[in-house]
Image (tube, helix red, strand yellow):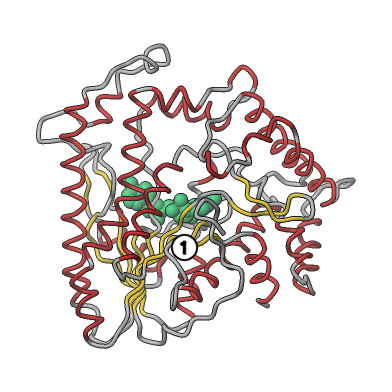
């Protein structure tokens, strides 16, 4: 491996650190079917105590508030643990010094005609960023004060970072995002045009705060707890979810590929750098770069499921036994009369090797902007495969996403005991091995 290629987990690791009574802290709020549910299940199975946080809610005036008693009870029931009720929303899209406009206010007057050339007040944005960062760091400090009293000496602690996001609620951007991620033909929009605009630059800054810098604030904010735990014989670990493409089967070989356009990629590389810096300082923090799956957050990306579906092939290749066979049958039963998994895989194989996709297999150039041809073929292949199903709401990609969530949970839980590095890719080979190994 060179530094310019992904460092991958290749064997199934086994947790030999966490035991009953240790503490699992979820840094991010749990919503439905997301990645962290797999890791949380492992922590619960090991008998760990679960503590969560909330991103808070906004009142009519957009002020961030804690959860009401009813919301808190519901969130705690959903999590299966206690929640520290201090709103920890990252990003600064709705922050500003008192009486001044927020970044979302600055974006409000922009229209489809003006956004590309509109100039933003960067001094104002910087003031808002400073307010947002101070607010978030303050929330983390308050959370850590409460948490400190909840963790006894000698316990092992796992902090699981799951935060990603930061799309501001500006009308014009919602239209643009729809066109960048879902537009084909005449509705296609170049992701590069967005990045070249002031609005795009603002959004990238907000992504950095939510998806990357929040991990730094977690690591720094928990320094006192870490020191106390380590002094008393316990250990502290940090994990975060990254995305930086995935090795999947293309033909008969595993090969790195990526979903395009992943605008958040710059923030994900910052997240990796934060883990690298912490690791070098002796803090066991690892970013796990995970496969493309469908979640509440990723449904905005049309075609995100295309790299997921060849996992079916990997299941067979990695000593697929009875479980792999069952998964194939379950998936095939979701297709309508006259369609088979082979048809699905054929559509993806054609997509993978098409000329228009060739420039995108370039790890060192990631994240690349989209192109008209690439958006068109991605969305068309995605639609064609969706149409092979009996029911648009029961897709093979739903089933496979759930399996990947479960498998990555086990892999991450196993690896964090003694993490081999700060940034690790979980590719389809090891994910398939884990799925086949689980009953
Ligand atoms: N879905 C994928 O294909 C995929 C692939 C690789 C990595 N990931 C990563 O996995 C992690 C979990 O994402 P997911 O896809 O499971 O979706 P998800 O919607 O379940 O999780 C997103 C998380 O981000 C938090 N969040 C969103 N905006 C926030 C803000 N402004 N401040 C603080 N927290 C905020 C939410 O509370 C939630 O916990 C993310 O880091 C994501 O980038 C996802």
The residue most toward the left is 98
Which residue: 49% across, 28% down? 191
Quadrant that contains the C terminus: bottom right
Expressed as whole percent of the image width and height from the top left, the position of residue 48 reads: 39, 81
Which residue: 9% across, 35% down? 98
Which residue: 37% across, 22% down? 197
Q: Is residue 434 left or right of residue 13?
A: right
Q: Secondary structure at mark 1?
A: helix
Expressed as whole percent of the image width and height from the top left, the position of residue 19 reads: 41, 86
Q: Is residue 242 visible?
A: yes
- Number of other residues with Cα within 10 Å of mark 1, as a class: few under 14, some 14 to 19, many 20 or more: many
Q: Is residue 293 visible?
A: no
Q: Which residue is mark 1?
A: 36
Q: Is residue 51 left or right of residue 337?
A: left
The quarter of the displayed image where residue 1 is located? bottom right
Looking at the image, is 58 positioned above or below residue 246?
above
The residue most toward the front is 2
Q: Is residue 4 left or right of residue 339?
A: left
């Amino acid at each position: 491996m060179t530094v310019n290629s992904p460092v991958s987990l290749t064997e199934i690791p086994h947790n030999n650190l966490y035991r009953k009574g240790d503490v699992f802290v979820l840094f991010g709020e749990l919503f439905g079917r997301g990645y962290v549910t797999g890791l949380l299940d492992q922590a619960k199975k090991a008998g760990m105590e679960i503590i969560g946080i909330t991103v808070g809610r906004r009142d009519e005036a957009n002020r961030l508030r804690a959860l009401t008693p009813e919301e808190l009870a519901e969130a705690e029931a959903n999590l299966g643990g206690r929640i520290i009720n201090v709103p920890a929303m990252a990003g600064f899209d709705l922050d500003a010094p008192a009486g001044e406009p927020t970044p979302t206010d600055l974006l409000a007057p922009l229209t489809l005609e003006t956004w590309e050339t509109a100039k933003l007040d960067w001094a104002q944005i910087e003031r808002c960023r400073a307010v947002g960062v101070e607010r978030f760091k303050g929330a983390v400090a308050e959370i850590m004060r409460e948490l400190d009293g909840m963790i006894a000496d000698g316990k092992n602690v796992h902090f699981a970072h799951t935060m990603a996001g930061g799309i501001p609620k500006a009308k014009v951007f919602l239209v643009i995002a729809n066109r960048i991620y879902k537009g084909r033909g005449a509705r296609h929009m170049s992701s590069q045009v967005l990045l070249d605009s002031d609005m795009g630059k603002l959004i990238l800054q907000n992504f950095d705060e939510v998806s990357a810098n929040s991990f730094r604030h977690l690591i720094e904010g928990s320094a006192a707890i870490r020191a106390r735990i380590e002094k008393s014989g316990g250990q502290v670990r940090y994990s975060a979810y990254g995305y930086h493409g995935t090795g999947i089967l293309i033909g008969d070989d595993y090969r790195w590929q990526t979903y395009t356009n992943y605008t958040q990629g710059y923030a994900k590389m910052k997240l990796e750098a934060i883990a690298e810096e912490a690791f070098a300082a002796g803090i066991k923090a690892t970013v796990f770069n995970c496969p493309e799956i469908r979640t509440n957050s990723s449904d905005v990306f049309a075609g995100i499921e295309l790299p997921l579906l060849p996992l079916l092939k990997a299941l067979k290749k990695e000593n697929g036994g009875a479980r792999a066979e069952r998964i194939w049958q379950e998936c095939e039963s979701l297709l309508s009369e006259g369609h088979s998994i082979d048809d699905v895989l054929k559509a993806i194989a054609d997509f993978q090797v098409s000329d228009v996709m060739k420039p995108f297999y370039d790890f060192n150039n990631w994240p690349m902007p989209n192109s008209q041809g690439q958006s068109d073929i991605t969305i068309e292949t995605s639609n064609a495969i969706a149409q092979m199903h009996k029911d648009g709401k029961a897709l093979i990609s739903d089933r496979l996403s759930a399996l990947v969530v479960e498998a990555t949970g086990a892999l991450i839980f196993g690896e964090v005991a003694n993490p081999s590095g700060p940034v690790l890719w979980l590719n389809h080979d090891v994910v398939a091995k884990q799925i086949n190994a689980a009953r």
